[in-house]
Amino acid sequence: MGKPSTVTARAATVLGTLVILAGVGEVGLRIAGYYPLEDFHGQDWRGALVRATEDPIGAYELVPGARGFGWDCEIEINSHGFRGGEVALEAAEGVLRIAAIGDSVTFGNKLPVEHAYPAQLESALNDNGYPAEVLNLGVGGYDVLQSLLCLERIGLALEPDVVVLGYCVNDIGTVSLSRRYVEKTQEYASALYRLRIAQWLRIRSDTADIGIDLVRRNEPERFRGENEGYITDLDDDPTTLAYLRDIEKLLGQFEIPAGHTYLPWYASRPHVGKLRASLERFARLATDHGFRPLLVILPVLGEAGLNVLYDRAYALVEMEARRAGLEVVTLRTTVRANRPSTLRVDRSDFVHYNEKGNAIVARRIGGWLVEQGLFER
């Protein structure tokens, strides 16, 4: 008869100890100023700025009319659903309308909108007597196909004369916020997550869960299954397959550090097949809707001694773009000549460009536009 009471007493002791430890942890985290969901609770920015799309491939989109702080910058989404102020449905007479699509570099993570290359491109062109309007349709985490779906969903109605696709090296795979992430953030509004200890536990769990999920989603067979219908079969292209085998051999000669784990995707048939299908879609859209398509390859700002692999990745993207009939601007030489580390938005971020880096991108695109004779003088 004594055993049940003993077990109960031990359970109560353990529970009491856990409650005390949780209380101590809560106090400690508050004293340390730990409040990772402060912006979320203050403005509910993820719920306000991002929503899931009906199309599972698109995954998520920006919310028209939303405003708030997110991705380390102030954000204003116009009524059409992209970053920036309001624009008319039709461009003014004599003004070249350019739509910039892409991921977080195009969007301008960690920067005011005027420092991102779309806005700098518009200012530079107008200041030099070339009337232009540049629309920033970038969305953080988008791959090439998602960028094109965004163009189809909201950009084509604005009848751009030119569409610039800003391509980052990780755009060949799945790196975007998933529906699961959008759904998870909705749960953070619960009163439970006013507790710092609850935030600490949940964020650690979600970060690990999402990280593992993204790794698994880029495993070739799963990637092929989740992107069925959006991948071109490469079996009848011995040249490209030989290129992929060369990259695979090169990969065996390097230890790929954290942060560069997308490089093996350039040896993956499903990933390259999806890239090809997406670039072909871009070319078809250009033909069907009468705009000039331009692919701009945006190099990373720190290649960790993997220059030879990055060169092969950039060259593969350029080859696939030209195969689809697209025009290409690559900034590899320009970026390397400008000390890549000086172009970073912050010291540890080798993906996102600062104001100076974005100005370099804007100048190269502007130079191409002028060279093509796209402005009436």
Image: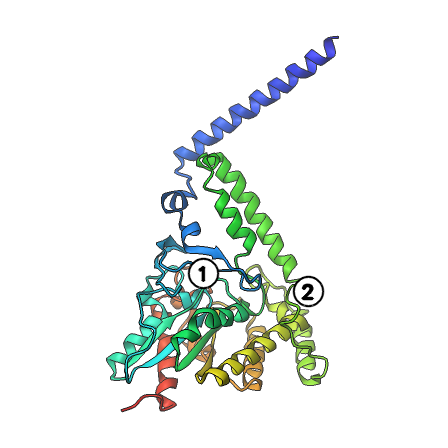
Residue 327 visible in this rendered orientation of the protein: no
Quarter of the rendering containing residue 352: bottom left
SS at circle 2? helix
Q: Nearer the viewer, mark 2 or mark 1?
A: 2
The residue under the point 28% across, 83% down is 93
Tell me if mark 1 has few (under 14), some (14-19) or many (20+) residues whose alpha carbon lies within 10 angstroms of its own. some
The residue under the point 52% across, 26% down is 21
Which quadrant: the N terminus?
top right
The residue under the point 72% across, 80% down is 235
The amino acid type of the residue labelled 1 equals Asp
Q: Position of residue 184 (x, y in %)?
A: 53, 47
Q: Position of residue 231 (x, y in %)?
A: 64, 73
The residue under the point 36% across, 88% down is 374
Q: Which residue is mark 1?
A: 349
Residue 164 visible in this rendered orientation of the protein: yes
Is 256 situated above or below 125? above
Tell me if mark 2 has few (under 14), some (14-19) or many (20+) residues whose alpha carbon lies within 10 angstroms of its own. few
Q: Which residue is mark 2?
A: 225
Is 30 situated above or below 216? above
SS at circle 1? loop
Which quadrant: the C terminus?
bottom left
Label located before the other in sequence (2 or 1): 2
Quarter of the rendering containing residue 123: bottom left
Q: Considering depth in this image, is 354 or 163 the residue closer to the camera?
A: 163
Q: Considering depth in this image, is 292 or 10 the residue closer to the camera?
A: 292
Toward the top, the furthest residue is 1
